[in-house]
Image: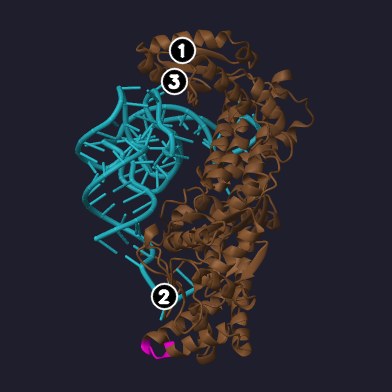
Chain colours: A brown, B cyan
RNA sequence: GGGCGAGUGGCUUAGCCCGGACAUAGCGUCAGCCUCCUAAGCUGAAUGCCGGGGGUUCAAAUCCCCCCUCGCCCGCCA
């Protein structure tokens, strides 16, 4: 893909070509030079084997050839041998090019790709409020959505509403049979959870209730108007509650897609008909797929013996619809969906359809064990948000007592949100985590507020600076270090979109803030004079803009004072 | 029992796909820094057989095999 014309990558590509020419090797991957250089090559080791010479000798010879190459000279880079390693050091021209891009609004945006992507995330069952496990899904999903937009993809974000599951039938049974009036000031989703938990307790006491729940499920599948209406009403109320939470988290969906629609519009029947024709189909009492040849030991059931569809059938119908309308399908799912997601992917391929890319994240548990809506054992996202805002408000009041209350409240909302989103997105999705209040409420060092603070500092300097002339050539070590960090941003966006790893962006934003804080400590900006002042102010403008773009891509407010 | 994921200083964590030059950072501990652009900050010190054992390689946290521990999953639930 021909993205944003990255000044660093441009030079790297030339060096790769020159190196290929000099060595007659195809595979000449360059690595990060660390402290030694901008880029480095270890090709000498491999050549030493073939040529039966010492790698040190080879490195020395190669450096001579490379430095004589006119194409290489044009990049402004120079190469030198350090033992067997070949180090490449770039001049600051690429930094100047990067900085010019970095002061522009929207820095980091890549060129439009003309690829339509559908991203599904959150999709929690509407049987109780979102908890800290669900919002790991929301925050990973929403961050990826922001990255994909920035990376130039056409994007639609969907929430798949499971409105015909057993859990919802239990909720409906609860409203029909238990004392279930809403309490004063109770949020809709919390109300649903209370009834759901109570209904489950009744079922535990009297298992015969299960029959009544089954009846409700059959009625809804066959489209009984009164039952459908009840299901829709409770699910909608729960979603109204979710909407408040998601809005507080700065998480946005473009469309809510209802599972039951895929029964009504005939998609599920159609997919069942297609599945029947597969060689792996077993159409007996139930309709199921035998996927053993693909390594699945259990049957993948599509239709029950009573003729009703199971979740898998509707999910296949939904994914077929997505595959038909988009170029790339991405789902963000919890680790508990790994098996069924790979069965779904396998089946989609058998049907000749585009299989979704799945981003799995591992579980969030509590110190006392795993969370359960059914058992009422969870920390709700709403509680977390409220606690975080309270903490942030206290903190702002201590630091900025002179600000009026409205202002402090507004800052506290942004800071609280930053703390939550960053705390969750900073760790790789593959790692299971234990929710820890103390850590979540931390506003220091590796936190969202820390990055916001660096941004606010930069804003403050710029505000005091007044007008200045842009000067894009960094000079001192601190200036160069900061410029190098700023220059990485577009590559980071590209990497996150291809690896589907949003924590990479979180790490980058933190490292950028670190580098700026160090710069801030060592180099005077406003008190410096002439070219130096212009140069440093240009850097501050570039870092401010890059921090802003990074924060906003993380769904965090880039506030200018705090 | 089988499948998937994780195991990195006291705690949390990056790097692993694509093997290279002293393993990233934070918390905590210790020692410093506000007549200086926002101290939600900065500097320095101590703390690592990168879960264990084999192997491949000039070179392994990274690749391969075995084992151990933890999490998730293996339903005519969703």
Residue A203, above or below A73? below
> Which class describes the residues within 10 Å of circle 3: few (<14), some (14-19), or many (20+)?
many
Question: Can you give x and y, in whole percent of width and height, for residue A298 in the image?
Answer: 36, 67
Per the rendering, the mark at residue A43 is 3
Q: Are marks 1 and 3 on the same chain?
A: yes
Figure quadrant of the N terminus of chain A: top right
> Number of marks in the image?
3
Residue at the spot 52% in from the left edge and 50% down from the top edge = A425
- In magenta, the rendered stretch is A205-210
Q: Earlier in the sequence, mark 1 or mark 2?
A: 1
Q: Specify whether residue A190 is painted magenta.
A: no
Q: Read off the residue under disc 2.
A: A375
The Cα–Cα distance between marks 2 and 3, rounded to whole angstroms, is 59 Å
Q: Earlier in the sequence, mark 2 or mark 3?
A: 3
Q: CA distance from mark 1 to mark 3?
A: 12 Å
Kindly state the secondary structure of the residue where label 2 is placed: loop
Choose the circle earlier in sequence order: 1 or 3: 3
Vertical comparison of A345 with A531: above or below: below
Q: Which residue is mark 1?
A: A81
Q: Are labels 1 and 2 assigned to the same chain?
A: yes
Question: Alpha-carbon distance for marks 1 and 2?
Answer: 64 Å
Residue A462 bears which disc, if any? none
Callouts 1 and 3 close, C-beta under 8 Å:
no
As drawn, A259 above or below A448: below
Answer with left or right where residue A491 lies relative to residue A306: right
What residue is shown at x 42% (from left), y 67% (from top)? A371
**Which is nearer the eye, A146 or A49?**
A49
Looking at the image, which is closer to me, A404 or A421?
A421
Please state which of the two labelled residues, at mark 2 or mark 3, is closer to the viewer. Answer: 3
Query: Around disc 1, counting alpha carbons within 10 Å, would you say few (fewer than 14), some (14 to 19), or many (20 or more)?
Result: many
């Amino acid at each position: 893909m021909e993205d944003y014309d990255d000044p660093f990558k441009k030079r790297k590509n030339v060096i790769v070509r020159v190196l290929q020419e000099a060595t007659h090797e195809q595979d000449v991957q360059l690595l990060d030079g660390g402290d030694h250089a901008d880029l480095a090559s270890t090709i000498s080791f491999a050549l030493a084997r073939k040529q039966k010479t010492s790698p040190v000798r080879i490195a020395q010879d190669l450096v001579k050839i490379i430095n004589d190459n006119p194409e290489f000279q044009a990049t402004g880079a120079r190469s030198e041998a350090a033992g067997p390693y070949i180090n490449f050091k770039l001049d600051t021209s690429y930094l100047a090019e990067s900085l010019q891009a970095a002061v522009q609004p929207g820095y980091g945006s890549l060129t439009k790709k003309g690829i339509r992507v559908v991203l599904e995330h959150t999709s929690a069952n509407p049987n109780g409020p979102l908890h800290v496990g669900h919002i790991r899904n929301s925050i990973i999903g929403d961050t990826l959505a922001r990255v994909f937009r920035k990376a130039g993809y056409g994007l639609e974000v969907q929430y798949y509403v499971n409105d015909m599951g057993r859990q919802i039938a239990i909720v409906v049974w609860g409203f029909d049979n238990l004392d279930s009036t809403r309490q004063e000031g109770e949020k809709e989703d919390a109300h649903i959870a209370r009834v759901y938990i109570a209904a489950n307790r009744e079922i535990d006491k009297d298992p015969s209730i299960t029959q009544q729940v089954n009846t409700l499920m059959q009625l809804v599948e066959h489209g009984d108007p009164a039952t459908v209406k009840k299901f829709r009403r409770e699910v909608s109320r729960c979603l109204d509650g979710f909407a408040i939470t998601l809005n507080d988290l700065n998480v946005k969906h473009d469309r809510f897609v209802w599972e039951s629609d895929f029964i009504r519009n005939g998609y599920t029947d159609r997919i069942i008909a297609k599945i029947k024709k597969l060689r792996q189909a077993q159409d007996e009492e139930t309709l199921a797929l035998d996927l053993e040849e693909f390594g699945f030991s259990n049957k993948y059931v599509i239709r029950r013996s009573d003729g009703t569809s199971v979740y898998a059938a509707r999910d296949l119908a939904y994914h077929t619809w997505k595959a038909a309308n988009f170029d790339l399908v991405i789902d963000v799912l919890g680790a508990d969906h790994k098996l069924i997601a790979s069965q779904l992917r396998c089946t989609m391929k058998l049907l000749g359809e585009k299989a979704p890319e799945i981003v799995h994240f591992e579980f969030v548990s509590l110190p006392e064990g795993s969370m359960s809506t059914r058992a009422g054992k969870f920390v709700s996202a709403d509680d977390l948000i409220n606690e975080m805002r309270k903490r942030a408000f206290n903190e702002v009041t201590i630091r900025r007592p002179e600000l009026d209350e409205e202002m402090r409240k507004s800052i506290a909302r942004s800071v609280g949100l930053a703390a939550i989103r960053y705390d969750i997105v900073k760790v790789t999705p593959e790692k299971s985590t234990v929710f820890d209040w103390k850590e979540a409420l931390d506003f220091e060092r590796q936190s969202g507020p820390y990055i916001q603070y660096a941004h606010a500092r930069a804003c403050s300097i710029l505000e005091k600076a007044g007008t200045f002339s842009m000067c894009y050539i960094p000079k001192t070590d601190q200036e160069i270090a900061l410029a190098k960090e700023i220059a990485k941003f577009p590559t980071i966006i590209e990497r996150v979109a291809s690896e589907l790893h949003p924590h990479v962006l979180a790490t980058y934003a933190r490292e950028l803030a670190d580098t700026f804080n160090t710069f801030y400590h060592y180099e005077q900006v406003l008190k410096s004079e002439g070219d130096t002042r212009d140069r440093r102010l240009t850097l501050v403008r570039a870092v401010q803009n890059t921090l802003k773009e990074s924060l906003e891509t993380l769904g965090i407010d880039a506030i200018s004072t705090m």
